[in-house]
Image (cartoon, grey):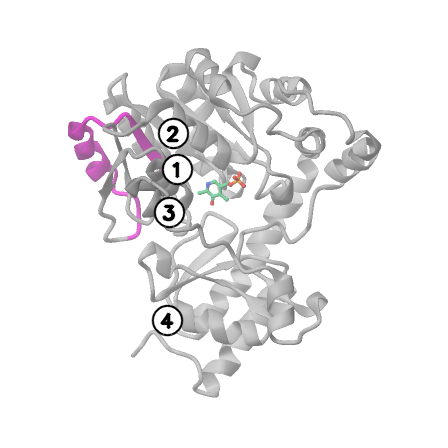
Amino acid sequence: MMEKLDIPDHIASIKSYVPGRPIEAIAQAYSLDPAQVLKLASNENPLGPSPGAMAAMSRYAPDVSRYPDNDCTLLTKALADWHEISEEWIVTGAGSESVIGNAVSTLLYSGRKTAYSQYSFQAYGNAVQRVGAEPFIVPSPHLVVDLAGLRDSLSYNPAVVYIANPGNPTGTLLPSEEIYDFLKCVPAHTVVILDEAYLEFVAPDQRGDSVKWVREFPNLLVTRTFSKAYGLAGLRIGYGIAQAALINMLRRVRAPFVDSQLAQIAAQGALGDQEFIEKTVHNNSQSKAILEEGFREMNMSFLPSHTNFLLVNSGNGGKWAEILEQDGIIVRPVTGYGLPQWLRISVGMPKDSVRVIEAMKKLLQRAIAPTNNL
Ligand SMILES: *Cc1c(COP(=O)(O)O)cnc(C)c1O
């Protein structure tokens, strides 16, 4: 007799994460030269990895036959020095997403609750669903995290509250004082995950001092990544900062050898190359200004972005993505987030911004493209 697989409902109902389409796939689909395909779909650093990271990686390459240092000793020490905290307060992971996933596995299970804003990072919702916990999703009618709504959600007694600041796919920033006031309201048994994947792109005077908040709140976990401004998305390396008691648990849950030695070494090299971060942020603001001007000229509204991407009201994000792909430009529809009118475009080099704006204007002129004035 054939037995059926017995997959629990909370797993079978997970929607697969839809990443930006790879360059090779688009080149093949439209017979384009891969070198001409422009990917503005995954918020990657258009400058590539930092020279500091590149140098560290090439020195290490011959040693990849060895297992990595499971404790990430040197990277953890470098991060502790950088943030002026104890090494006991840091856990690394294969991307900050894996740190967030480990926090979810540590704190949530079927029957426990979590609260987060509508239009939050999809990977968070997926991690929650994997463990069968119950999400409370706070409506976000203005596409900005509603902290008052999140505060109200505390009455449901969530074990975890997740906030990305700036957010993805929105790119918007919550004022640091408001986050601090929120943290003060959260009971000790509720852990707040504050995801700061795009922190480096936030103007210094608008950043909250989240490491200082960690000193004050034993139930706060801050996550950071080397994927975005540091340009190491392909290596998968990020980290979490919290007080030792919570970090200790996250370290137990962390799978052995998840952080490759190449990733650890590159991250150390990247951390030591802050000049590259300055360059990255400068390039980002120049190139983002070109996109913003272009969208204004096309009468398309966009959210104020504190990141390396823009969320623009294009009328029909899926359609735009489809027709831009034919021009070899990959952008990100956000229909899966419940935002079918919007389109997320990563900030590339200034010439990339010029290219995408020109392509969009041309498509509008030829009346092929949807508009947001329909
Ligand atoms: C890109 C991103 C991350 C980081 O992902 P990694 O796993 O570190 O590559 C985390 N949170 C948000 C909101 C992001 O957009």
C-alpha distance separating marks 2 and 1: 7 Å
Q: In which quarter of the image is the C terminus?
A: bottom left
> Does 155 appear above or below 206?
above
Nearest the eye: 231 or 275 = 231
Residue carrying label 2: 104
C-alpha distance separating marks 1 and 4: 28 Å
Identify the magenta region: 143-164
Looking at the image, tell me whether mark 3 or mark 1 is earlier in sequence order.
3
Name the element at disc 3.
loop
**Residue plotted at (71% across, 25% down):** 67
C-alpha distance separating marks 3 and 4: 45 Å
Q: Does the segment drawn in magenta span residue 156?
A: yes
C-alpha distance separating marks 2 and 4: 34 Å
Looking at the image, tell me whether mark 2 or mark 1 is earlier in sequence order.
2
Residues under numbered marks 3 and 1 in contact, where contact means CB atoms less than 8 Å apart = no
Query: Which of the 4 quarters of the picture holds residue 126?
Result: top left
Q: What residue type is labelled 1?
A: Ala
Query: Which of the 4 quarters of the picture holds residue 54?
Result: top right
